[in-house]
Amino acid sequence: MDTPLHEKIALITGAAGAIGMATATVLAERGASIAAMDVKGADFTALRKAIPDTKRLLVLEGDVTDEASYSGCVASTVKTFGKIDIFFNNAGIEGTAAPIPDFPLDVFRKVIEVNVIGVFLGLKLVIPVMVKAGCGSIINSSSVAGLIGSAGMCAYVASKHAVVGLTQTAAVEWGAHGIRVNCINPGPIESRMMASIEKGLGADAAAAVHAGIAAKVPMLRYGTAGEVAGVVAFLASDDSGYVNGAFYTVDGGLTAA
Ligand SMILES: NC(=O)c1ccc[n+]([C@@H]2O[C@H](COP(=O)([O-])OP(=O)(O)OC[C@H]3O[C@@H](n4cnc5c(N)ncnc54)[C@H](O)[C@@H]3O)[C@@H](O)[C@H]2O)c1
C-alpha cells in the first residue's frame, strides 16, 4: 500500500539539526526521498543512519545565506530526483540573549541573515521549481517567538515574526499555482538550540531557566523534535490539501495561555 508521501521529494534545510533530522526521518518513513542540506562540515552521520537507503537520501553541503551555494543545492536536488514536492525551509540560528540596548549589532545582523534572508532565498529558489510542476507544499520554520515577544531575544523574535509574514505573502502569491505555504511555530523543544538559549538567559542557572520555561507551558514540559516532525509531515501531505497561509503552533498550549 502506498504511504502518504510515497514518491514525494523533500528538500530540507538545517537537516543535520534536531528538528530537520527528525523531520527527514519521519518523511522518509512515510515514503519520501530526502535532499538534506546543511552547512559545510555538518555532521550527517545520524541522518545517514536513519535513512540508510542511499537512493533516497541526497546530502548537500550549502549555505542558505549564499545565493550561489543555495542555488547549487536546489539544482542538485532537481538533477538527482527530478522535482521538489516538499520544501521544509527550516535552517535557523538563535543568536545570543541580551536586552535590546546591549544586543550586539553584528549578532542581530547574522540572525536576520540566516533566519530571514535564508528563508526568503529558499522561497525564491524553490517556488519556480514547484510552479513548473504545478504543485508543492512549503513549510517554513517560525517559532512561538514569531507570534509573541521574548525578553532578551530581540533578533530571534524579529526574525521569526518575519517568517510568518513571508509565509503569508508566499501563500497569497502562489496559491493559484497549486503551491501551499504554511509555517510551524514550535514552543520549547528539547534540543541543542533550547539548551543554548537557556544558557544565554540564565548563565549558570540554565537548569532553573529550563524548569521555569517548562512550568509556563500548560502541558508542563518541553516538546520533542519528533512532535514537530509529525506536524510538518501533516502539512507536507495531501491531508492538509486546503491548508495555505496558516501557522501551526506546536507548543503544548504555551501561546494559548
Ligand atoms: N529547538 C527549538 O526549541 C525551536 C523552537 C522553535 C523554532 N525552532 C526553529 O526550528 C529550526 C530548527 O531548529 P533546531 O532546534 O533543529 O536547531 P539546530 O541548531 O539543531 O538546527 C539548525 C540547523 O540549521 C543549520 N544552519 C544554520 N545556519 C545555516 C546556514 N547558513 N545554511 C545552512 N544551514 C544552516 C545548522 O547547522 C543546524 O544544523 C530553526 O529555524 C529554529 O529557529 C526551534
Image: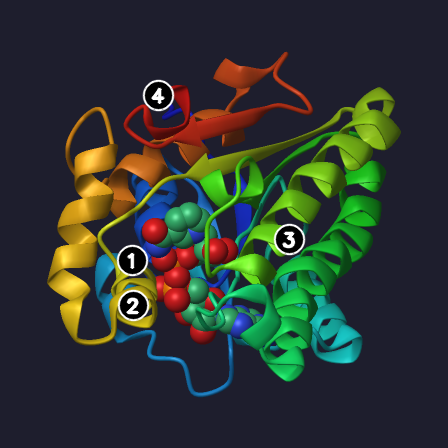
Question: Spatial distance from mark 1 to mark 3, Cα to Cα?
Answer: 35 Å
Q: Earlier in the sequence, mark 1 or mark 3?
A: 1
Task: Inspect the image, locate mark 1, and give the three-letter code of the amino acid beneath it.
Answer: Ile
Kindly tell me whether mark 3's CB lies below 8 Å from ligand 1: no
Q: Disc 1 marks which residue?
A: 51
Quarter of image, res 41? bottom left
Q: Position of residue 60 (x, y in %)?
A: 53, 73
Question: Spatial distance from mark 1 to mark 4, Cα to Cα?
Answer: 38 Å
Q: Nearer the viewer, residue 178 or 186?
A: 186
Q: Nearer the viewer, residue 82 or 128?
A: 128
Circle 1/circle 2 CB separation < 8 Å: yes
Is disc 1 placed on a helix, strand or loop? loop
Q: Position of residue 137 (x, y in %)?
A: 63, 33
Circle 3/circle 4 CB separation < 8 Å: no
- The image's mark for residue 149 is none
Q: Earlier in the sequence, mark 3 or mark 2?
A: 2
Q: Nearer the viewer, mark 1 or mark 3?
A: 3
Question: Spatial distance from mark 3 to mark 2, Cα to Cα?
Answer: 34 Å
Q: Disc 4 marks which residue?
A: 257
Mark 3 Cα-neighbour bin, 10 Å: few <14, some 14–19, many ≥20 = many
Quarter of image, res 49? bottom left
Residue 113 visible from this viewpoint = yes
Circle 1/circle 3 CB separation < 8 Å: no
Circle 2/circle 4 CB separation < 8 Å: no
Q: Disc 3 marks which residue?
A: 158
Mark 4 Cα-neighbour bin, 10 Å: few <14, some 14–19, many ≥20 = few
Circle 1/circle 4 CB separation < 8 Å: no
Q: Disc 2 marks which residue?
A: 48
Kindly tell me whether mark 4's CB lies below 8 Å from ligand 1: no
Q: Residue at x 78, y 48 (%)?
A: 129
Q: Is residue 141 above or below residue 250?
A: below
